[in-house]
């Protein structure tokens, strides 16, 4: 999973309200998950031999083959390419060439060079090896457009052939999940209006959360994009050939001819206001060079065919990402392998056990069930995004996505949190499934994280597929144990670190309950007469 910040998690106030009561107990003779099977899957996938399962690595290839072998053992039908379990994806990994980035500002009276990386940073291009863009600058506030929220930061502005300048982030009054989606669409809004580049301002408010120096630390990290079958990178807005992220003080030079001082803009942002846009009266030339290399990595897909003559052509899709972040380069540590036990060997283990339960239940579901292990989640949800664009079954026939990402199985949880449950009819299915095992459904305790937009279900959501994503809640059944504290401690001490490994005190019996609930969710969806639907009031029901 990809979290932007874990600071403050340990201080969460856990006053969670239950959304549903337990209405029945799970029958004892029904198929159930196996703790030993979950442990076996997790320990193999998170072993040192797989070296952190980085996208394109030998370790991840082994993980993919292991998952495919499990699917084959269960008798599931291959659902990859060319009659196989694998959907092989080519990726372009892009690196910014050393000392190639430059930012020249022309104020009319003077020419100013901004220093890289102290005053501005930029990333590589996935599309071209050399970029050289010179254009006038236009300030566009946050750079957001939304009819649903009455936003249009481009109103009255002409940005055709120009570079837009915008504040980082989004206004606080927007709901977290909807705001996160809009924030991720800023390049789309700019490109649709003819802009040729984006300059983002690092604001004083952002400095409090993530200092500019922290961003500088990640400058050498490559960017990764999947490649179309024709070899073109998945770059939707090829006209957007310039980008820069400008430090707070350096940004003042962009506003030397502006009708509003930058200090006043910052004050408006801090007050929660939406600054109006205007021409800045200056131009900029942005240059950079990029180096490209190609890697490949597979999704792994299998199907359990449904039993109903009509509904078997519809699919309930389970997803779990099999990749992690590989080997660390931090020489201060003795252990360099990021095993990813919770992130996401645990989710894959749950998916494999869920598949076994469906096969061995003795009763075939009416709809077909697809199990999809996706790659490159840690690189930006890329494997899921590729499948959403190049599905091996018609996308319109995928009725729902149940995503399994990083269940923190370190305590005997008494509740679950279901991201997406408030946006579709899947919420009722989750509440009933959890209730079967005496588990309550609680509200999102950290809405500021906008997790509904941050895992592998999100590419499917953007394509119109209702989705739900379960996480262990913050209430523990164990007297005197604070589930939220255990969860928070994991993120503070182990998330994306070598210590996320199988020797953690993993509660596999809690894993059994978690798996049973996810199985129950899929079983209900697969056998319902009507397919799940978005709630009409949900923002996500109206995405393009």
Image (cartoon, helix red, strand yellow):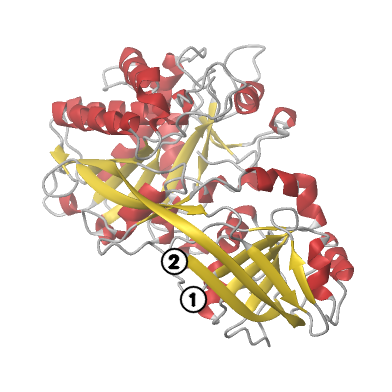
Towards the viewer: 142 or 421: 142
How many other residues sit within 10 Å of disc 2, few (<14), some (14-19) or many (≥20)?
some
Place of residue 492 in the rendered image (x, y in percent of width and height, measured from the top left): 65, 27
Towards the viewer: 495 or 227: 227
- Residue found at x 44% / y 36%: 405
Q: Is residue 156 left or right of residue 504?
A: right
Q: According to the image, label 1 marks what residue?
A: 239
- Residue found at x 21% / y 46%: 367
Place of residue 274 in the rendered image (x, y in percent of width and height, measured from the top left): 77, 70
Place of residue 227 in the rendered image (x, y in percent of width and height, measured from the top left): 33, 58
Q: Is residue 274 left or right of residue 169?
A: right
| Quarter of the image that includes the C terminus | bottom left
In this rendering, the label closer to the viewer, 1 or 2:
2
Dot 1 falls on a residue whose secondary structure is loop
Mark before the other along the chain sequence, 1 or 2 = 2
Give above or below for 222 relative to 11: below
Residue 128, which numbered label? 2
Q: Residue furthest front?
A: 99
Towards the viewer: 286 or 57: 286
Q: How many marks?
A: 2
Does the rendering let one see residue 23?
no
The part of the image, by quadrant, that contains residue 67 is top left
Give above or below for 49 relative to 426: above
Q: CA distance from mark 1 to mark 2?
A: 11 Å
How many other residues sit within 10 Å of disc 1, few (<14), some (14-19) or many (≥20)?
some
Towards the viewer: 291 or 178: 291
Dot 2 falls on a residue whose secondary structure is loop
Does the rendering let one see residue 86?
yes
């Amino acid at each position: 999973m990809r979290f932007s910040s874990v600071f403050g998690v340990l201080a969460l106030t856990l006053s969670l309200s239950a959304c549903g009561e337990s209405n029945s107990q799970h029958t004892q003779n029904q198929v159930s998950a196996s703790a030993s099977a979950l442990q076996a899957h997790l320990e193999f996938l998170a072993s040192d031999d797989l070296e952190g399962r980085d996208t394109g690595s030998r370790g991840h290839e082994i993980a993919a083959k292991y998952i495919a072998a499990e699917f084959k053992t269960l008798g599931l039908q291959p659902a990859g390419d060319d009659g196989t379990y694998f959907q092989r994806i080519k990726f372009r990994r892009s690196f910014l060439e050393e000392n190639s980035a430059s930012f020249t500002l022309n104020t009319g009276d003077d020419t100013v060079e901004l220093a890289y990386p102290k005053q501005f940073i930029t990333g590589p291009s996935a599309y071209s090896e050399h970029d050289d863009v010179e254009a006038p600058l236009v300030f566009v506030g946050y750079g957001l457009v939304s009819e649903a929220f009455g936003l249009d930061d481009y109103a009255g502005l002409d940005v055709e052939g120009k570079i837009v300048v915008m504040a980082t982030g989004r206004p606080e009054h927007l709901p977290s999940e909807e705001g996160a989606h809009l924030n991720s669409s800023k390049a789309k809004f700019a490109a649709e209006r003819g802009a040729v580049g984006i300059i983002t301002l690092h604001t004083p408010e952002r400095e409090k959360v993530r200092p500019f120096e922290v961003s500088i630390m990640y400058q050498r990290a490559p960017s990764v994009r999947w490649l179309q079958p024709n070899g073109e990178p998945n770059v939707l807005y090829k006209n957007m050939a310039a980008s820069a992220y400008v430090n707070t003080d350096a940004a003042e030079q962009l506003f030397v001819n502006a009708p509003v001082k930058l200090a006043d803009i910052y004050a408006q942002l801090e007050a929660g206001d939406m600054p109006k846009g205007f021409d800045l009266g200056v131009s900029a030339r942005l240059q950079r060079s990029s180096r490209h290399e190609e890697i490949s990595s597979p999704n792994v897909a299998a199907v359990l065919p449904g039993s109903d003559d009509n509904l078997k052509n519809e699919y309930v899709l389970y997803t779990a990402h099999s990749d992690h972040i590989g080997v660390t380069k931090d020489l201060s540590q003795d252990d360099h392998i990021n095993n990813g036990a919770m992130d996401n060997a645990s989710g894959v283990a749950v998916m494999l056990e869920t598949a076994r339960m469906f096969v061995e239940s003795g009763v075939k579901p009416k709809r077909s069930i697809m199990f999809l292990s996706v790659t490159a989640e840690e690189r930006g949800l890329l494997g899921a995004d590729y499948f959403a664009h190049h599905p091996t079954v018609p996308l319109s026939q995928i009725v729902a996505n149940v995503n399994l990402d990083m269940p923190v199985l370190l305590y005997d949880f008494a509740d679950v949190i279901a991201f997406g449950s408030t946006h579709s009819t899947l919420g009722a299915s989750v509440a009933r499934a959890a209730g079967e095992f005496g588990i309550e459904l609680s509200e999102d305790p950290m809405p500021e994280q906008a997790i509904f937009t941050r895992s592998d279900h999100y590419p499917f959501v953007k394509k119109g597929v209702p989705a739900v994503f379960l996480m262990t809640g913050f209430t523990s059944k164990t007297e005197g144990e604070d589930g939220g504290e255990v969860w928070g401690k994991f993120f503070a001490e182990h998330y994306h670190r070598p210590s996320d490994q199988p020797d953690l005190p993993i509660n596999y019996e809690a894993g059994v309950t978690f798996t049973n609930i996810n199985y129950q969710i899929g079983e209900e969806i697969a056998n319902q007469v009507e397919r799940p639907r978005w709630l009409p009031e949900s923002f996500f029901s109206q995405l393009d």
